[in-house]
Amino acid sequence: MGARIDGRGAADLRLVTIERDVLDHAEGSCTIRFGKTWVMCAASVEDRQPGWLRGTESGWVTAEYSMLPRSTHTRTQREVERGRPGGRTQEISRLIGRSMRGVVNLELLGQRTVTIDCDVLQADGGTRTASITGGYVALAIALNKLIAADKISPSTLQSQVAAVSVGLVKEQPHLDLCYEEDSTAGVDFNVVMTGEDDFVEVQGTAEGKPFSRSQMDELMDLARAGITELFERQQAALEKS
Amino acid sequence: MGARIDGRGAADLRLVTIERDVLDHAEGSCTIRFGKTWVMCAASVEDRQPGWLRGTESGWVTAEYSMLPRSTHTRTQREVERGRPGGRTQEISRLIGRSMRGVVNLELLGQRTVTIDCDVLQADGGTRTASITGGYVALAIALNKLIAADKISPSTLQSQVAAVSVGLVKEQPHLDLCYEEDSTAGVDFNVVMTGEDDFVEVQGTAEGKPFSRSQMDELMDLARAGITELFERQQAALEKS
Amino acid sequence: MGARIDGRGAADLRLVTIERDVLDHAEGSCTIRFGKTWVMCAASVEDRQPGWLRGTESGWVTAEYSMLPRSTHTRTQREVERGRPGGRTQEISRLIGRSMRGVVNLELLGQRTVTIDCDVLQADGGTRTASITGGYVALAIALNKLIAADKISPSTLQSQVAAVSVGLVKEQPHLDLCYEEDSTAGVDFNVVMTGEDDFVEVQGTAEGKPFSRSQMDELMDLARAGITELFERQQAALEKS
Amino acid sequence: MGARIDGRGAADLRLVTIERDVLDHAEGSCTIRFGKTWVMCAASVEDRQPGWLRGTESGWVTAEYSMLPRSTHTRTQREVERGRPGGRTQEISRLIGRSMRGVVNLELLGQRTVTIDCDVLQADGGTRTASITGGYVALAIALNKLIAADKISPSTLQSQVAAVSVGLVKEQPHLDLCYEEDSTAGVDFNVVMTGEDDFVEVQGTAEGKPFSRSQMDELMDLARAGITELFERQQAALEKS
Amino acid sequence: MGARIDGRGAADLRLVTIERDVLDHAEGSCTIRFGKTWVMCAASVEDRQPGWLRGTESGWVTAEYSMLPRSTHTRTQREVERGRPGGRTQEISRLIGRSMRGVVNLELLGQRTVTIDCDVLQADGGTRTASITGGYVALAIALNKLIAADKISPSTLQSQVAAVSVGLVKEQPHLDLCYEEDSTAGVDFNVVMTGEDDFVEVQGTAEGKPFSRSQMDELMDLARAGITELFERQQAALEKS
Amino acid sequence: MGARIDGRGAADLRLVTIERDVLDHAEGSCTIRFGKTWVMCAASVEDRQPGWLRGTESGWVTAEYSMLPRSTHTRTQREVERGRPGGRTQEISRLIGRSMRGVVNLELLGQRTVTIDCDVLQADGGTRTASITGGYVALAIALNKLIAADKISPSTLQSQVAAVSVGLVKEQPHLDLCYEEDSTAGVDFNVVMTGEDDFVEVQGTAEGKPFSRSQMDELMDLARAGITELFERQQAALEKS
C-alpha cells in the first residue's frame, strides 16, 4: 500500500486549519479547511423556539448545509434554481443538526434556536465531516458567549463533537478521503463521535462490493484515531480567541 | 428486561408476511407487513437508461418511497401539497435505491431502468427496512422474468438483500422496533445486509445519549440474526409464485 | 352488439368487492375494487374546522385523490416530483369532495373536518367512481363511530352516495367502462347519485362526436341501474363490520 | 317567480357583447361580455405539435384560463405567487380546451397548436361559459385566416360551439346566472353545445339539495334556448370583420 | 435623422389614451395606451397593513406587473406554469411600487394597503412606463374616493408621477421607444418624475456601447419634456370622471 | 457635515481589499471587501452556448448573486427554502450580468458561457457594487487564461468595469454607503462605469424625497471619482498574480 494521491499515509488526516471569528454579525463563526475542502460555518442564536416546541422549556439546534455553485470541479446549478434543496443537501443538513444536538442539552439551552449554517466554499471530499467539525467550533463560540453572559448554564454544551470519513480504497482502509479517493472508494463511512469516544452517528455505505464485519471494525478504529486528532484542532482554535 | 409492548422478546421480529404479485401491471410487486407496518412494493422495468448513463452499456436501479397520508396515526399532509418531497422521504428513497443496487450487476442489466416504488399503506415503525425487504422481492420477481425471457444473464441479480432496524430501548438492544419503541429508543440502527452476511449499509443514530463501540457490536449481532430470518421469508414468498 | 372485452353485457358492472377496516389508524377505511381498479379509501376525522369556516358551527368534508406511480400500465411520474398535483388530480379530488358533502349535513357535523383520501393502488378505468363509492363507505364508518359515541346526530349522514361511469362505445351505451373501453369511448359520463335517486353530479364529455339529448337520456337510465346495484354492495360491506 | 336581481326574466340572457380583433399580435381575438363579466380571448397559432403528437399528422387545440387579480369583488392573490394554478383554474382550462376540440378536426388542422387564452378582466358569474363562447370567436377568426390562406381545409372547423350556465335558484330554473345568483343557486349546470344542437359537455353539480331527473330535463331545455341565442351573437360578431 | 418607424419625430410621444373607471369592482382603474402598448391598471384598497408594518400607523402601496400570454408578438408561456414570476416581472413590479410610494404619504394613508395591478393586454415597448403612468391614474381615483369620504387627508397624495422611456437609437436620442426601436437601441433609460420635476427613479442601461455623461444629459432633457406631456394626459383623464 | 459613522469623509471609499485566486477549481476567482462587506466572486467558463444563441458564433456572460444566510445582521432564510430567488436577488444578478457584458465582446468570446457567481459572505451595504467590482477581477482572470492559451483574442475583454454606490445622506452626497447609511439615505444610486469613463448602468432611486437634476449631477461626479479609485485596486490585484 503506497502513498496516496497527495502523499499522505493511509491513516493521515489532510492539513486541517480552523480560523475562528471570521464573521462580524454571527454569534459564532469559523472557516475550516480539510485540505482543499473549505467550509464557512456560522452559528446564529435566536430567542425563539421552533413552533413544535412551544409550551416547553426546550430550545433547538438545527443546521443547513449548502454548496456554492463553483465549490465543485465544474460549476453546479444552484438548488434555488430547481426550486428545492436536493436529497443529498437535506440528508447532510439533517446529519449536521443531529450531530450538534448530540452534545447540547436542549433543556438547558432554554427557549432559543441555534442554527448552524455550513456553506461549502470549495469541495474536495469530506464536506460533511468538515462541516460537523467546524460547525462545532461555531456552536461552541456562540454558546460560550451565552455562558459568559450568564444566560445559560455551562453544562449546556455537554461534550465535544467531530467527524471524519473513512473508506476502503482498493480494499484498504483510508482516513479522510479526498474527492478523487472518495469517488473510487468501494466503501465509505462517515463517523461522528463525542469527546467521550462514543458515537453520535455511524453511516456506512458500500458503493460497490459489500463489506464484512471485520472491515467495519478496522474502519471504526481508524476513524476514532482521526477524530481524536480533530478534537485537538478544535481545542486549539477555541483557545486562540 | 420484561416483554415488549406487543409481547415479543427483545430478539424477536414482528410477524412478517409477504404477498407477491398483487399488481397486474407492474413487472414485479408484493405487499409486505412487519406487524402493522404495511408497504406496497412495485418494480417497474423500462427499456431506457437515465440520461447520465447514455453512451454506456449500463442500466440503473432506483427507488422512490412515499407514505399515504393516512398511513400515520394522525393524518399527514401529502408532500405534493408542499411542492416537494421532504428530507426524510428523499433520504429513505436514496437508501432503498443504494440497497437494491448493492445486489444488482448494473452492466449485466443492460440499458434498462428498474424503479422500485415503496408506498407505505400503514406505518408502525420500520417502514424503510420493510421497504428494502419487500423491494427486493419485487425486484427479484421483475428480474427473474427478464432472466426467464433470456433478456438478461442470471448473474444480474448477485445476491439477496434485506434490512432490519435494531435499537437501544432503555439501554437494552431490541430487534425490529415498532413505532412506540422507536420513538423512545435512545439509539436506532438500520442495517442492510446481503445473503453473504456482508453489509450494504449501516446507519446508526444516537437520538439521545451517544453509544459505545460495544453497544454497537451487540446491535450488529442482533441485526444479523433478524436479517437471516427475513431472507427465509423472502425465499418462501419468491418460491410460491 | 356482442360481448365486451371481459365478457360482460353492456349493462353489467364489473366485479365489485369492498373490504372494510383495512387500516388500523384511520377512523374509517376500505379497499374497493371495480374489476382490476383498486382503491384504498381512508376517512380521517379531525376536531378542527378549515380556517374559512371559523366563527361558524359548521364542519367540512374534503377529499384528496392520487394514483400510486405503478397503478398504471406503464409507470407514471409522481406528481410531487413535478411540484404540484396535476389538473386531472385536482379535478377528481374536488368531485369526490362535493359528492361526499352532498350527503352530509355540515352543520350537524360540528367543528370537525373529515378528509377522504382515495389512493389508487391499481387503475383500470373508473378510478373516480370507485373512489366515490368506496369513499362513502369509509365516510360512513367514521361517522357511524361518532354517532355511536353520541358526538354527532344520526341525521348527520343524510343519504347514501355512489357513482358509476357510463359511455357510448361504438355508439352503444355501456355501463362501468374499463380502461380499454374508456379510451375508445366517444362519450363518457360520470354520474353521482344519492339513495333517493337524485343527482349530486352529472359530468358528460364528448371525446369525439357530440352526443344528442336522447343518447344522454339512455345513459342516465343505465347509470341509475348501476348505482342502485352499488348501493347494495355498500350496504353489504357496512353491515359486515 | 318575480323578476331577477337585474330585472331579467328567468329565461333571459344578460346583455352579450362581442368585440372582435381587439389585439394586433394574436391570430384571432375578441373581448366578450356577459353583463359585467368581461373576458379577453386570444387565439395563438403555432406551427408545432405538442410533443406527444410527434409522428402523427394531427394538430392540437388547448386553452388556458386565468383571472386578473382585481377581476373579483375583492382582490384575489395571483396564482403565480402561490407557485401553481389552482384546481378551479385548471378544471376550467381543460373544459375550454375540450369544448374547442369538440368542433375542430385535429387531423385537418395539421401539425399546428392553437392555444386559446381566456383572461377574465372582470368576473360576475359565468366566466367559463363566456370564455367558451368568446373563445370560439377567437378560434374561428384564427382558423378562417388559415383557410383564406389555403393552409387548411374549410372543413377543419366543423361546427359552432357556445356555452351557458343554468341553475336552480329557489328551486326555479334560471338561465345565465350572475355571481349573486350563482352563489345562492342550489344546482348549477354548465352546458356546452354545438351548432347541431348536440352536447360537447354537460356538467351539473348540486351545491345543496340533490336534483331530480325532471329538474335536469327542464334545465337542459333552458340551456338549449340560451345557446341558440349565443350562436347568433357569435355569427354577428364574425360577420362584422 | 429621418422620421421614425411610425412617422413620429424623435421627441414625440406615441398616441396616449387613458380611459378611466373601466372596472366595476376596483376602487380605481383605467386602461392606458402608449401606441399599441395597452395596460389595464387597477387600484385595490384594503383595510389592513402588511405584517411588517404592524404596530405602526403607516400604510403601504405596492404593485404587481404581469403580461397576458398573448400580449407579445408570439405567445409567451404564463409565469404560473414555471412556478414563479420571472426576474424581469419582479423588477418591474418593484419599480412601479416605488414610483407610487414616491408620491404617497404613507403615514397619512393610515393602516391600509393599496395594490396597483398592471396587467399588460398588449406589449409594444414601454410597458413599464405606461404602467406607472396609468397606475398613477388608478391610484389617484382610489385615493380621491377616500379623500371624498373623509377617510384620509387630501395631503396623502403629494404629487403626480409619470414615466417615460428614452434611448439612443443609432446614437440619437429618442423619446418613448416602441418595441422595434427598443430592441435596437444601444442605450435605454426609464425615467420616473414627479409633478415638481424631480426624479423618483432613473434607470439607464447600455445594451451595447456605454454612454457618456453628455448623452445622459440630453436624454434627461428629452424625458422631462415627455413626462410633462404625460402629466397633462393624466390630468385630463382624472378630470373627466 | 461631520465625519461619517466610521470616520470617513463624504467622498471616501471604505477600505477595499481584493484577494485573487482563492479557489482552486474556478477559472477565475477573488474575494473582495468593501469595509465589512465581503463577497466571493467566481468565474466559470463552459464550452457551450445558452440554447437561444445556438446557430450563432456568439458566447454569453451571465451572473448569479446570492447572500449566505448569516451574511446579514440577523439570519435570513435561504431562498431555496422559499422555492425561488427573490425579486431583489434576481434584479442584482441581472445587473451584474449586464455590467460584465458591457465590457466583453461576445462574438469574440466564441461559443462559450462565462458565469460570474457572487456569493455574499458578509453584507454591510454595497454588496452589488462590490460584486460587480470583484466580478470583473474574476472575469478578467478567466479571460486572460483563455487569451494566454490563444483560445480567444486579446480584444475580447474590451475595457475595465467597476461600480460604486452614492447617495444623499441628510441631503448631502456621500460615496460608498455602508448599511447604516444606506438605510437612512433619502436617495441611493448605483453607478457602473467602464475604463473610458462611460456609463454601463445608472440606477437611482428616491427612497423618500425625490431628487433634483443638480443633485443627480453632484452624485455622478462623486461616483466617477470613486470608480476611478476602484479601477486602480482592480489593476493592482490583477497584476499580483
Image: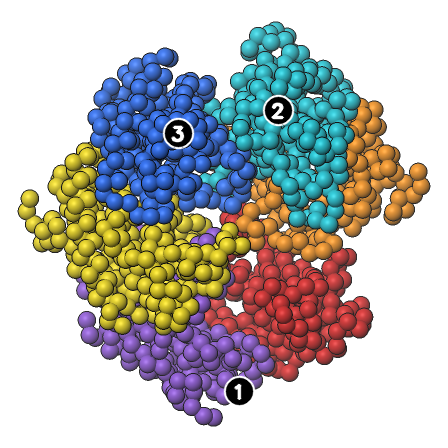
Chain colours: A red, B purple, C yellow, D blue, E cyan, F orange
Which residue occupies 50% across, 33% down? D71
Amino acid at pointer 2: Gly
Say which quarter of the image contains residue D227: top left
Callout 3 secondary element: loop
Q: Position of residue C184 (x, y in %)?
A: 19, 42
Amino acid at pointer 3: Ala
Label 1: chain letter: B
Q: Which residue appears farthest toward the front when viewing the image? A: D2
Left-right relation of F162 to E3: right
Callouts 2 and 3 in the same chain:
no
* Mark carried by residue B171: 1
Which residue occupies 47% across, 44% down? D84
Q: Residues within 10 Å of mark 2 (few under 14, many from 20)?
A: many
Say which quarter of the image contains residue C55: bottom right
Distance between the alpha carbons at the discs numbered 1 and 2 = 72 Å
Per the image, the residue denoted by label 2 is: E134
